[in-house]
């Protein structure tokens, strides 16, 4: 009586992925009709991208085995590292692949066969080939139908394979938080020192932005950055990294960044390990990024470097429109200073400006620094500009603009907040006024005013100055401990003048001019 066992039959195979199909024939001890299926497996995921240093698992999936009565068929996985740039201990034995034995792999009846291998990717870029070997073990044949021996499909070592890309992420953007608001130089403005309405780009470092934006912060404060990293195409496995930057000036601590399967970006927020340097700072900060995969090798792996121009100020810049050009200038002048008075002195002596009597000041006053040199200002406006520069550096202490006047007969100087507080005297003798002039003294008034000439040239009424921390700063000259010291340094001669109209002044230079000392050499 003929056996009721099913005869071998042809099966249509569905492969998982783009696995290469082996061309080797099945090895049988009898002639099968129809031919026996060799059960080629596919690799999941196919053509994967994994993060260097991560530990990942690949699966081999085989379609149902329907060509044997009692199929017992293991699948074994192997990995070969193909990159020629790896060191020897990462390659392993060059004569054979490092092997990871499969888990499971027994295929029973019509079930789909699945087996897996877990692989530790190296800590560097490259590529690897994942291969699974597929083998049908010997199984009984239908002897009642005249078959003899046992049936055995030969092992098919190339039944499934796929190339794995291993990549180190690249940091593509770094955004500094809690920074001072600044405006970029407006390319359409008259001068780079002019006001601007162009806010700076954020994030400050971005590979898609042509130039990195500078960062402005208060010295000796904590910093926070948001970092974003990238690989050239979506990753195939969820991978959590620990990222940090160990730059010497502003190091940033560890923070997690997760690449989700199907995504090519990951980001993390980092706090600075230490405060920013406790000094006025104007320098490029290099950030050396690195990461580790705790679930993988857990070794620190270097990523790329990023950089940003960092300006550290005394406090929040104020007083006028805060542009990168202006912040850069004040930070350069006071670079390395830590104390406010020293910063004020550094800016004062670094201004390089001299007062010019009768000049029309520019708007804004920052145009005084334009390299064209076409803008000038007198001592009063230079005092205002000095305050602007200090406020741009974040100086918050009182700075008072005022005026220093000479006293009569070379007796020193006097400080005042008024621009009309010079020395006056009344005419005591009746007109007409003598002294070689034919203008009657009383045609306008009988008041005479004390003026001076000296270091600034021409005729001057006062010296505009800034009172800060007990010193009187006269731009273009020096800082003085007392108004009299300023006058002794600046004044060559004082003299009395009188008016015959609201615009015309005459000198009282010869006797019998009223009052003492019509002219005094200091």
Image: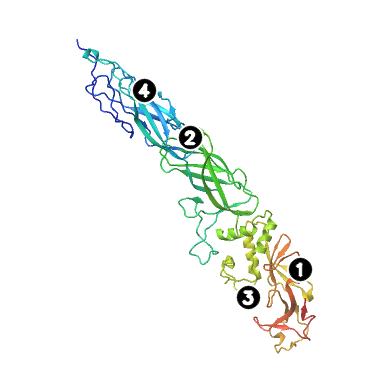
The residue carrying mark 3 is 358
Q: Can you say whether 117 is above or below 292 in the image?
A: above
| Front disc: 4 or 3 | 4
The circle drawn on residue 90 is: 2
Q: Secondary structure at mark 2?
A: helix
Look at the image and tell me whether residue 166 can be seen. no
Separation of marks 2 and 3 at Cα, in angstroms: 79 Å
The residue carrying mark 4 is 74
Q: Are marks 2 and 3 in contact (CB under 8 Å)?
A: no
Q: Secondary structure at mark 4?
A: loop
Which badge, 2 or 1, comes first in the chain's sequence? 2
Q: Nearer the viewer, residue 177 or 445?
A: 177
Q: Residue 137 is drawn in which quadrant?
A: top left
The circle drawn on residue 59 is: none
Q: Can you say whether 318 is above or below 502 in the image?
A: above
The residue carrying mark 1 is 485
Which badge, 2 or 4, comes first in the chain's sequence? 4
Mark 4 residue crowding within 10 angstroms, few (<14) / some (14–19) / many (20+):
many
Mark 1 residue crowding within 10 angstroms, few (<14) / some (14–19) / many (20+):
some
Q: Quadrant of the C terminus?
A: bottom right
Mark 3 residue crowding within 10 angstroms, few (<14) / some (14–19) / many (20+):
few
């Amino acid at each position: 009586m003929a056996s009721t066992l099913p005869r071998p039959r042809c099966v249509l195979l569905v492969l998982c992925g783009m696995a290469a199909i082996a061309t080797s024939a099945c090895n049988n001890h009898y002639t099968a009709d129809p031919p026996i299926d060799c059960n080629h497996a596919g690799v999941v995921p196919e053509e994967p991208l994994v993060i260097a240093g991560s530990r990942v698992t690949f699966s081999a999936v085989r379609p149902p085995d329907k060509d044997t009565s009692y199929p017992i068929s293991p699948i074994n996985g192997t990995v070969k590292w193909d990159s020629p740039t790896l060191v020897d201990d990462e390659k392993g034995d060059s004569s054979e692949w490092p092997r990871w034995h499969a888990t499971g792999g027994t295929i029973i009846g019509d079930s789909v066969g699945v087996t897996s291998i877990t692989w530790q990717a190296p800590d560097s870029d490259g590529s690897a080939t994942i291969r699974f070997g597929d083998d049908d073990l010997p199984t009984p044949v239908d002897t009642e139908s005249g078959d003899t021996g046992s049936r055995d499909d030969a092992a098919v070592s190339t039944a499934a394979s796929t190339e794995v890309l291993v990549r180190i992420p690249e940091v593509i953007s770094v955004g500094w938080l809690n920074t001072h608001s600044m405006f970029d130089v407006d390319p359409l403005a008259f001068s780079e020192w002019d006001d601007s309405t162009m806010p700076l780009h954020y994030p400050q470092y971005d590979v898609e932005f042509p130039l990195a934006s500078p960062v402005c912060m208060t010295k000796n404060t904590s910093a926070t950055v948001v970092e974003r990293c990238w690989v050239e195409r979506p990753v195939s496995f969820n991978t959590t990294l620990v990222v940090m930057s160990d730059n010497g000036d502003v190091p940033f601590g560890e923070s997690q960044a997760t690449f989700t399967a199907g995504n090519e970006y990951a980001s993390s927020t980092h706090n600075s390990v230490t405060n920013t340097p406790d000094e006025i700072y104007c320098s490029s900060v290099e950030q050396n990024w690195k990461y580790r995969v705790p679930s993988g090798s857990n070794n620190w792996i270097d990523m790329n470097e990023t950089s940003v121009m960092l300006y550290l100020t005394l406090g929040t810049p104020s007083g006028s429109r805060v542009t990168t050009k202006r912040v850069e200038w004040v930070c350069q002048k006071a670079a390395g200073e830590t104390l406010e008075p020293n910063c004020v002195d550094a800016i004062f002596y670094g201004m390089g400006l001299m007062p010019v009597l009768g000049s029309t000041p520019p708007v804004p006053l920052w145009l005084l620094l334009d390299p064209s040199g076409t803008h000038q200002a007198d001592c009063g406006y230079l005092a205002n500009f000095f305050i602007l520069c200090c406020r741009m550096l974040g100086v918050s202490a009182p700075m008072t603009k005022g005026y220093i006047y000479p006293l009569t007969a070379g007796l020193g100087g006097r400080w005042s907040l008024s621009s009309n507080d010079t020395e006056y005297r009344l005419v005591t003798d009746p007109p007409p006024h003598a002294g070689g002039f034919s203008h009657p003294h009383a045609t306008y008034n009988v008041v005479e005013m004390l003026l001076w000439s000296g270091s600034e040239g021409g005729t001057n009424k006062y010296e505009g100055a800034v009172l800060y921390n007990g010193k009187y700063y006269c731009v273009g000259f020096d800082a003085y401990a007392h108004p009299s010291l300023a006058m002794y340094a600046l004044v060559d001669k004082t003299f009395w003048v009188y008016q015959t109209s609201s615009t015309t002044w005459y000198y009282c230079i010869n006797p019998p001019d009223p009052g003492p000392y019509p002219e005094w050499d200091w």
